[in-house]
Image (cartoon, helix red, strand yellow):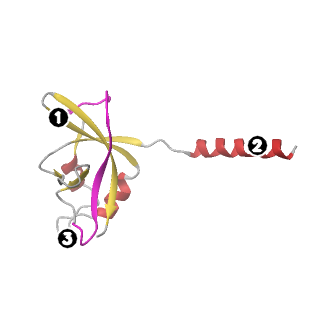
Amino acid sequence: MKIVVFILIALFSSVILKAQEKTKDTLFFNYDNKYIKTHAEIPNHFYLQDGSGSNYGSFYFQKVKNLDNQKTNKKTALCLKDFVQSSAFYDKNKNPKLNDYKLWEYFNSYVVILVKKNHQKIEFIQVDSAYEIE
């Protein structure tokens, strides 16, 4: 009898936890080679030109996987540079201009997809936001 009660409690708990999971909204951004920088040593990290650098902590996107058949195209994706520079995390009058940590917190609430056009093919790269201090 105790085993049955334990199993029922375990099943009920897992249902409650599943119900509390929140689906994240998706943001699509155009991949801009001039604004998004990569390094040969770590090609799956995408750094922003406005990033504060390792002295203050650095924001970057880390590649999760490539996706197929997304419900957007390059024309409907947002400009990442315009988005970042018009956000509350960016102040052109401060040094550093970008608050990398706050940007990381913001993007953690979303699924982010970079839309990259390669020779007539559109590539969808799902990324996670990351922040590191060296």
Name the amino acid type tagged 1.
Answer: Lys
SS at mark 2?
A: helix
Q: Earlier in the sequence, mark 2 or mark 1?
A: 2
Check the image and report above or below for 53 versus 105.
Answer: below
Q: Look at discs 3 and 2 and give the one toward the viewer.
A: 2
What secondary structure is marked by label 1? strand
- Quarter holding residue 3: top right
Q: Which residue is mark 3?
A: 94
Q: Which mark is residue 7?
A: 2
- 113 falls in the magenta region: no
Magenta segment: 53-76
Q: Earlier in the sequence, mark 3 or mark 2?
A: 2
The picture places residue 133, in percent across and down from the top left corner, at 31, 68
Residue at image location 33% in from the left, 53% down from the top? 129
Residue 109 in picture, x, y percent from top left: 41, 50
Residue 18 drawn above or below residue 94: above
Q: What separation in Å lies between label 3 and label 1 (alpha carbons)?
A: 34 Å
| Residue 10 horizontal side relative to residue 120, left or right | right
Work out whether residue 67 or residue 56 is closer to the camera in this orientation and state it: 67
